[in-house]
Image (tube, helix red, strand yellow):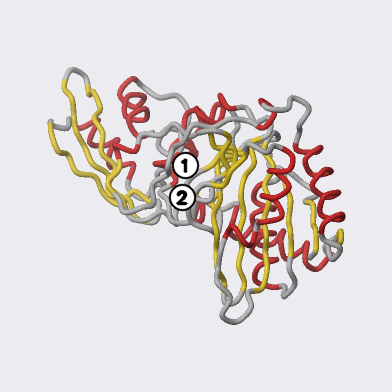
Amino acid sequence: MNLFISPCTDPYWNLAAEEILLKTSTENWLFLYVNKPCVVVGKHQTTQKEINPLYIYRNNVLVARRLSGGGAVYHDEGNLNFSYIRTMDHGENLSYQMITQSMVAFLTELVPEIRLSARNDLLLGENKISGSAMHVFKNRVLAHGTLLINCDLTHLSSALKGNPERFKDKSIASHRSPVMNLSQVNARLTPLLLITLFAEYLVKKEAMVQFTHLPSITQELISDLAVSRYRTSEWIYGYSPRYLYQNTVLAQTSKIAYQLEVEKGIIEDFIIVEGELNSDIKLLFNKLIGISHNIFALLEGPFMGPVNAAEQQLFQSLI
């Protein structure tokens, strides 16, 4: 098995690396990486539903979508991500526990109280320290997980504090669980130390593990995919399933209840459920048509520059 440790903390590059190693290689890989602060949603989730848009904007938290399903997670420099990528033998039973057994065995040797739940989460008591997901491509499988070591749990909680009640869709909802850091058990633990200890464990336990650097051509493929897919609004927000977004806005002295019809992340239409629009508010709603429903597109479009009180009220209701 090849052990590859990412040279960067760019979540878009690291997510692209997982896909390239999965789809263009026939070898088995263990890929370890640390990301700068970001929220990573599952492939089949509604991004806007899973995040706290204003918080991520104010705190420079990136937003990304991964190749696998499952729920949204928060990464920062206190979080270690591990990805097992391998070829399945014909007729082999697919099991996350089997694929990731070396990581689970290492962690339970380090902290015996750790256990693997039925959902393939790693738990300390009732608190989650690691979530997991899988993706299958032909006869190749990607099984990856997060590991909370000394993550900023305040940022984690705030960045993932969305408003799911405003959305009507068929997306996969995140399963929220109480979390904790491994450093709460052992204060000296950091992602870098865990990588070092895990590498030593693998060399000791699995003689076939070899440290690997990616050739330039593979790194170029990864960089190209990071730009063409993983950094794009079309992938991050546009891959979300069709949804209705519903909320209210105070227009002068009257409350207006409305719905937005959003397809591929783009606002296609609006419906006024309750209240009446005056000409100014109607003009604001009309400006939303064709705009991507995310805070960055809204601030670069109809709400760019100075805004009046009515515009501010509508903007706040949209995020």
As drawn, 68 above or below 195: below
Secondary structure at badge 1 equals: helix
Choose mark 1 or mark 2, whichever is in front: 2
As drawn, 33 above or below 58: below
Q: Residue at x 73, y 43 (%)?
A: 109
Where's the N terminus, which quadrant?
Answer: bottom right
Q: Quadrant of residue 167?
A: top left
Q: Residues within 10 Å of mark 1 (few under 14, many from 20)?
A: some
Left or right, residue 26 beside residue 259: right
Q: Quadrant of residue 227?
A: bottom right
User: For residue 229, which numbered disc appears in the image?
Assistant: none
* Residue 295 x, y percent position in the rendering: 46, 37
Give the Cα separation between the discs numbered 1 and 2.
Answer: 11 Å
Residue type, label 1? Ala
The residue singled out by tag 1 in the image is: 297
Q: Residue at x 70, y 37 (%)?
A: 111
Q: Residue at x 72, y 66 (%)?
A: 221
Q: Residue at x 74, y 63 (%)?
A: 29
* Residue 276 x, y percent position in the rendering: 13, 31
As drawn, 165 above or below 121: above
* Residue 47 x, y percent position in the rendering: 44, 46
Secondary structure at badge 2 equals: loop
In this view, the residue in front, 7 or 99, is: 99
In this view, the residue in front, 35 or 310, is: 35
In this view, the residue in front, 281 or 179, is: 179
- In the rendered image, the residue lying farthest to the front is 112
Residue type, label 2? Tyr
Q: Are marks 1 and 2 in contact (CB under 8 Å)?
A: yes
- First along the sequence among labels 1 and 2: 2
The residue singled out by tag 2 in the image is: 237
